[in-house]
Image: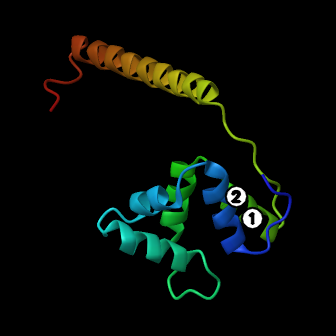
Amino acid sequence: MKLFYDDEFDAIATAIGDSGKPFKDVAAFMFPDMKQESAYARLKDCCSPTGTQRLTFGQVIRLMDFCNAYDPLMHACDETLHARPDRKAPEDEAVKLVEVIETATSTVERALKALDHLKNRGGIRAVA
């Protein structure tokens, strides 16, 4: 990852170049509804400061995900004077999700017990 980028176009080109994926493959992924040559030309145009086309924010995210390179994100952080983020470890995210699921399950179980208790006391007749 570079320390500095000239502009957003440099960041996008760096992400594509450092990914090890051929430019034509990235173009085909980015614009699957286009012929390969047209997709290639469009992505080239999007990556040029003098081009007439631009990638949307969503497309930049797709590009980073596909290339597994986050230079545009780092450039955005640099430009807005934010610290560059660390990448989350999938294992850590999985642990957090399991905790959320366990908490939600426990809450539902407690609510169902409270509902049964209320039913048994004759507090409610039917629940939709």
Q: Secondary structure at mark 2?
A: helix
Q: Quadrant of the C terminus?
A: top left
Instruction: Say whether residue 80 is left or right of residue 43.
Output: right
Q: Nearer the viewer, residue 90 or 51?
A: 51
The answer to whether 29 is drawn above or below residue 87 in the figure is below
Q: Nearer the viewer, residue 70 or 42?
A: 42
**Image quarter of residue 42:** bottom left
Q: Secondary structure at mark 1?
A: helix
Instruction: Say whether residue 44 is left or right of residue 81.
Output: left
Q: Amino acid at mark 2?
A: Asp
Instruction: Say whether residue 98 is left or right of residue 109.
Output: right
Tell me what residue is drawn at x 32 percent, y 18 percent.
Answer: 112
Q: Are marks 2 and 1 in contact (CB under 8 Å)?
A: yes
Q: How many marks?
A: 2
**Mark 1 highlights which residue?**
75
Q: Amino acid at mark 1?
A: His
Where is residue 92? Give x, y as percent: 64, 26
**Image quarter of residue 35:** bottom left
Tell me what residue is drawn at x 31 percent, y 13 percent.
Answer: 117
**Mark 2 highlights which residue?**
71
- The reply to whether residue 69 is in sight is no
